[in-house]
Image (cartoon, grey):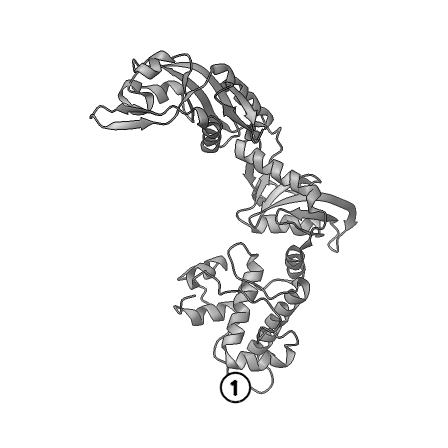
Amino acid sequence: MSDLDLDELRAELEGFAQPKKQAGRSPREERIIAGFEEIQRFVETHGRAPQHGEHRDIFERLYAVRLDRIREQADCRALVEPLDHQGLLAGEGLNLPQADELDDDALLAELGMAEGDPTGITELRHVRSAAEKREAEEIANRERCEDFDQFKPLFDRVAKDLEIGARITRQIRKDAGFLKSDIQQGEFFILGGQTVYVAEVGEPIKAPNGETDARLRVIYSNATESNLLLRSLQRALYKDETSRRISEPSAGPLFADEADTDDLASGTIYVLRSKSDHATVAENRELVHKIGVTGGEVEQRIAGARQQPTFLMADVEVVATYRLYNINRSRLENLIHRVFDPARLKITIPDRFGRNVEAREWFLVPLFVIDEAVDRIKDGSITDYIYDPPTASLRLVGG
């Protein structure tokens, strides 16, 4: 971490300004002690010191920076040393991390304090209510999931579905009406960079404010789990600006002539056949196909084909198109090209300036196999297959 504005960073974290000599404990000293006790509770829960790192929970990262600041300042060390039964100041028995990679400005941005903020660093920020602290502790209080092997296939399936576009992710916005009732057993979310699976929803309980709540069993993709309240998960999803809801595989057609109201039109897979008089193309015209994905109209994509090396400097004909929805176009195109990579046609064409250009999206593959690949994209099994040129068929990877 750089030394630039370090004093301001310290003040923002826990008011670590230079102390004033006062009788008894000053408000600043009380804050330091309270902050150290939060670190101790974290250690009691997790069995280790808080660590730095972008993949860590923001509160853990703040605890880690706070602990660094306490260790660095002699007056802070002296203040909390009588309380340090865990050896935090000396790092005894703990796997202490390296310093956080964030510089001061980046960490202040994480805290929501931009440079030049007119409120200044003297205004207390991120002071949470007791209820908010309890909810934050619930999120951070994760344990190892002993039966994760039962859930791992679910996470693997979701990852594949997202790769091929069978599922999509949608931003979670409070103003869009995301309710506690939207969190149901079997739902997947993305929170803090982890995929989250709601494995169980307990019986409804009455919260102190009169609202209905429930205890959840939540499994995370890093093989941990937590039993937090439904409302705690809802609040965490609200607060994480990168949180997403993962759709069900049936959330709209992958390929259709028409889109439903809620479908996101993504584009078209197109299969082209070249009219080039290049010897290799002419000899295998029924097998040489260009496979691509476009977000616009195919006719616009192939306009001026005879002037473009990617189209072999020749006119083309469209032999098949597949309209698609709710799919990431670039990922899908990369997936298709990976499947047919063994049949990729290595061909170099001179462009209109006489420079040799390698066209890479052409494949020696029959049209009926492309049709089969599209069907396997629909049912989500395509990631298990690769094209086998000797048999002119798709085969299981490793088969």
Camera-side residue of 181 and 288? 288
Camera-side residue of 397 and 11? 397
Crowd around label 1: few <14 · some 14–19 · many ≥20 (10 Å) = few
Q: What residue type is labelled 1?
A: Lys
Q: In the image, is 321 to the left or to the right of 199? A: left
Q: Residue at x 57, y 82 (%)?
A: 78
Q: In this view, does 273 lie above or below 250?
A: above
Q: Which residue lies furthest to the left in this view?
A: 353
Q: Residue furthest front?
A: 390
Place residue 250 in its image quadrant.
Answer: top right
Place residue 354 in its image quadrant.
Answer: top left
Q: In the image, is 72 to the left or to the right of 304? A: right
Query: Which image quarter is the N terminus in?
Result: bottom left
Instruction: Find residue 69 and report its horizontal and vertical position in percent.
Output: 51, 72
Instruction: Find residue 242 and report its horizontal and vertical position in percent.
Output: 53, 47
Dot 1: element: loop
Residue ID for mark 1: 21
Q: In this view, does 371 lie above or below 227?
A: above
Q: In this view, does 176 lie above or below 104?
A: above
Instruction: Find residue 135 and report its horizontal and vertical position in percent.
Output: 66, 57
Residue 284 visible in the snapshot: yes
Camera-side residue of 218 and 105? 218
